[in-house]
Structure formats: C-alpha cells, structure tokens
Image (cartoon, helix red, strand yellow):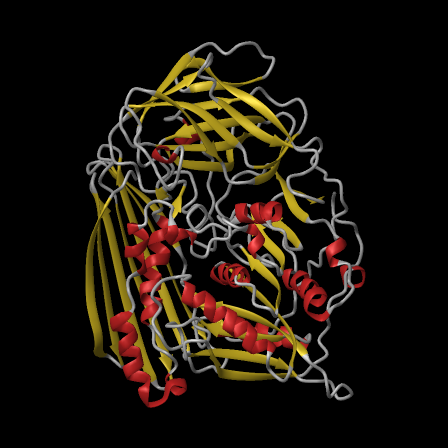
Amino acid sequence: MTTPSTDPASARPASQPEHAVAALFDIRIPVSDGVELSANLWLPEPRPDHADERFPAILEMIPYRKDDWRLAGDQARGEWLAARGFAFCRLDIRGTGSSPGIALDEYTARETHDGYDAVEWLAAQPWSNGNVGMWGISYGGFTSIQVAMLRPPHLKAIVPVMATDDRYLTDVHYIGGCVTVSELSQYAVSMVGMNAMPPKAEYRGAAWADEWRERLEETPIWLFEWLRQQHDGPYWRQGSLAADYGAIEAAIFSIGGWMDEYVDPVLRMQEHCTAPRRSLIGNWVHSLPDDAYPGPNLDWLHEMVRFFDHWLKGADNGVMDEAGLVYFRREYAAPERFPAEWPGAWVGEATWPPADAAERVLHLAAGEAPLVGRLAADGDGSVAPAVERFRHRPTTGARTAGLSWGAGGAPNGLGRDMRPDEALIPTFTSAPLEKPLDIVGFPTAILHWESSAPIATAVVRLMDVAPDGTSAQVTAGILNLTHRASHADPSPLEPGVVTEVRVVMRSIGYRFLAGHRVRLSVASSYWPVIWPSPFAAEYGLHLGGEADSRLVLPTVPSGDGPLAVPPFKTTPAGLREAGSYSGESPTWRIVDDVIDGSLTVTSSEFGETIMPDGRTSLYTGERLEMTARDDDPASARFHNEVVYRLRDSGSEILIEASGTMRSTATDFHMNVGLRVTLDGAPFFERGWLETIPRHLV
C-alpha cells in the first residue's frame, strides 16, 4: 500500500529535543581483561524540573576512528540523540582509534565480549535508567548483532543497518563460495592503512609513541587469514547468528536496501529470529536511508528513535503494532550508474514470508539462434531437449554491470544496459507480459550444467526488458559450482557430466510492468565482483526433458501488501553541521587492451575532512586497479593504494598502504606494503608476502 498522506510528526511522534547536552571525550570503559577502551559520550542533562531524571544509552562500536575519521558524524548524531534523552556512546574497538590493544581480526570473540562489558558499564552509570540499545551501519550493525547474541542483561534493543547474520554467506570476502575482488581489495587494503593510524596523542600521554609503534608491529594483515579460510567453517561461524537465531533476546529493528549486499539478512532475520522484531527495506545502496540512492528516502533517525522510545523508555507509541516488514516494491527505470530515485510503492507485510506467497516457474528453452533462448511458462507446451554451449569469459560483467556486489557512493555505482554482455552469453526471454507481475523474495535459477573443467562458476542475472529493448538488471545470483552441495565441504565437478545446480539470487521486491519481458542470463564470471574460476572451459547448459533448467520467481498476487504502511517522515532530521568535507572527482574507468588481451577496471576516490574544531584534518583516498584476461582465466590481479594524512595538534602523520593480489591456477600471491612518516620523517615501514593455495575457487 502507498503511504497515507498523514502528517508523520503527529501521527507517529518520537522524542523531541528537550535536553541540553554535555560532550565527554576519551571516557575510559574498563572491560573484563583489564583493558580500558576509549569512548566519546554525549549525555543529556536533566531538565530543570526533573533533577532525578535518568536516561537510556545507545552504543555504537566500530573500528573507524571516533576522534577524526568519524568525529563529525558522531558529534552531530550524538548531540541530536542526547537532546532527545538518549546518551550516545561511540566506542573505538580495541586496537583501533584511541583504544589500546591489538586488532587481531574483525569480529573476534574478545571484541564481542568487550561490547558486552561496555553495555553493562553504561547501564551501571549513575545517569542511566538501566536500559541500553545498540545501533550501527555495516560493521556497527555486525557488532550489535554479535553482542546481542551474548545476551547482556541490560541490552534491550538493537538497530542493525545493512549488516549480516552470516559472515561467510553475506559479507565482503566471499559470494556464493567465490573470492571477491572489488570489495575485498577496497576493504582489506584500506584497513591496513586504517589500523596503522595512531591513537589521539593527547589521550595516551607519554606512552603514545610506544603504543602506536606496538600497534604497527603487532597488527596482522586481516586479508591473509580471510584467504586461508576459503570454505565455511568454525572461523566464519564466530560472530554469525545463522546457526541459532534464537540467541538474540533483545528487540530487533533491521534496516536494509535492495541495492546493498546485506539485504538478504534482513529477510532471514525477520523470518527466523524469535525476539520481537521489525524490518525496513528501501531501494538503497550501502548508505544511510536519509540520503542513499536510489530514493525514495526517509528520516531513519525518526524511525530508530521511535523504536528506542518504546524499548528503552517504555513509550506506548504503537511502533510494534505496525507492519512487521515494510519494503519498497520498485518498478522499471532506465538503468543508470547513480539514479536519484526509482518509481514504485511502499508495501506492508505482517510476516515473512508473506502469507499469500506463491511461485511462478519459467522454463529455459532454445530459440531460433544460438544463445538467444526463451522463457516458457507452464502450459506453453513441452520444451524440446537442447544444449546451449558457451565458453568461459572471465571479463564478463565489467563493461556493463556494477563495480561491486553492493553499490555505494561514487565510484561504486550500479549497472547500465546489459545488452553488450548479453550478446556473448546465453539469454532466455519471456513473451511480453499481459499484466503486471509482482515478485518479492529470492528468485532462483535451477540449471543443468555441463563443464569441461572441475571448477566453474554460475552467474545468473534477472533482467527487465523494456519495450524499447533496454535490458535492466533486477537482481543476480552467484555460485561456485564446487559448492553446489555445501560451502563447508565443496567437491570438484566431473568434466562432461551434467549436474543440476540451484543458484539463489539476492532478494528483491519488484513489479514487472505489462508489456515488459522477463529475461534470465547465464554467465561464468562477474568481473570485477568475483575472482574468475581458473581454467579455460566450455560449458553446456542443458534444456528440456529430464534436464529441466528453469527460473523460479517468488510471487505475490497483487504486490500491494495486506497492511497499511506508516506515514514516514521524509524531511531531514535536522542534524547540526559539524565539520566539512571536500572531495576530488571520483573515477571509474574500463580499459580494454586489445594487444595485451586484458581488461582493466580502475577507480579512485580522494577527499579531505575538516574536523569540527576547524584545525584537525584528515585526507583519505584510494586508487584501485583490477585486471582479468579472457584467454588466461587463471591470471587475474588487483592492486590498491591507500593514503591517510592526518594533521592534528601541530603534527602531520602520513600513512601509505598498498596491496597486490594475483593468481595462478593453483595459488593466490599477495604483497602488502605499509609506510608511515611522522612530520616528514620515517617512522615505520614494512612489507608482507604471502602465498595461499587455491582450494576449489
């Protein structure tokens, strides 16, 4: 249902700014092993006629430097929340920012227990009412889920935004059992530089230089361990909720975006968690819903405060009486890299899956020309047996698709018209639809696949073909076919044998309009999203008869949903401008080297943040280069260069990190470098070399 035209401020009120705010920096929070972590805290002050007033706390814990890199946003959000009666605590996880210790990896058990301790510390403060919530986007969403799994007695509610319940299945390291490229290189190398930055000097005293040097010498390269763990197992189960959705007792409000890589966990948690829960999904990329593209946008802080008003302040505001899942059902829009908004409507569901969920099956059938097939509906007659043959092209995707699996700010944009790619791979297209077709959930391609090599990847894309022929991506799915039965215990394909495989696509809410056509394309690579399978190969896609390759669409009868949609507040939250940012123009280029036979995707992004004090500044940037070759699938490479330049308290710190990863048929070879200067003088320099065997990837 579309949003009613009701004033949201009066129809769905939230706490208003009634408090003066005190900002406290470098608060030390003791944890159970004796370490004192560093936090910034924004406290509401009791109103003059409420001297005994006590407040709930909201905790965010991430490694992204509260005293410079995230200070402006933290300060604006902290002041805003504190004015509304919530103490906001921003904690640097151990070994990052101004917190002591060593960051041995992301999401360690020790880190999560630190979060447990921080929750209980906040609840015990004299200003606290004993109720604590957690929130965060991405890493902070992960930590809120992971800490909630430990069940701190005073943690009452969490708001994970674009986060995951399963670290192997849905994160930046692997997709469908395939090693990632663009997201892995961006995140892994940037964290080498981020983890090398020092604590804030004025907070650490005389031990500052020694503590910083210890951090530089002892912090491992996280990427190496991620590459050692190529299959699912105990390493990835640490911090993953999926094994026990009942572990969380705190109330959950999950927020996701269809164009973000973490959207599937929103639906999985809504279905399987047992705690009180709500979920919200928009069109958005990996960014906060008030300004993420594609719109429509909404004031997510208003939604979060209403949720915390209920669970942390005891407000009887009806937030849990609203639709359990609200999502935006989008419609066709001409594809572009950075669309401002997509058409469609908000839909409200009481439960997930929807009570009226059904399936529509479309069978893959040969057409009149090779690789140009059709989708045949049930009842359209039998599909004659046929085989569509195509070869492995590692560069498929680079010319038309998105830069990453989950899009974000420039240069991480969305895909364009897919027809240039589709000319070289099998496609299957339906007849024009006579009436709209609404889908929500996880489309699935069931394929009968024959490979000449023991390792192969299936990449399927669901497309909306407009009447003018434009082919716009709706969603996609990826599966390393050696993982067809298990991500924990993969097995090679038997060359020449036809194998049935099931490729589940990323979830989507979408309406195909009348006159449009549904298309499924099948490829063997998705550059630069995933690392190509290593062998030159020919594939056969078997159709018809006993080899019934088919597309299964999760449908709902009308797509309008059974419940009213809340009247969302769409005006800005009104955060105070704190600090400023100026960025250089980002780049995203594709170089097709005809003589060399390679295709290279490059991107760059540089900019500088001026802190709220007007004196401290942080310049950040990265330059990324990713190369693959159709005639040599084993040989692929990424190289990333990252720079951080911090000017603080009269000193200048320059961090330069670089990472190169290249492959052969048998191994990944990695070369990571780090160089640190302080006021122009060398302070630290080191290089790391690592070779890790490929295990069926």
Residue 567 visible in the displayed image: no
Q: Is residue 8 left or right of residue 536?
A: right
Q: Is residue 404 above or below residue 552?
A: below
Q: Is residue 677 above or below residue 221?
A: below
Splitting the image into 4 quarters, where does residue 346 fall?
top right
**How many callouts does the rendering have?**
0
Q: Is residue 434 above or below residue 104?
A: above
Q: Residue at x 20, y 55 (%)?
A: 690
Residue 623 coordinates in the image, percent (x, y): 32, 57
**Quadrant, the N terminus:** top right
Residue 523 visible in the displayed image: yes
Q: Residue at x 21, y 44 (%)?
A: 667
Residue 376 coordinates in the image, percent (x, y): 54, 17
**Quadrant, the C terminus:** top left
Residue 679 coordinates in the image, percent (x, y): 27, 81
Residue 345 coordinates in the image, percent (x, y): 68, 43
Q: Residue at x 52, y 74 (%)?
A: 118
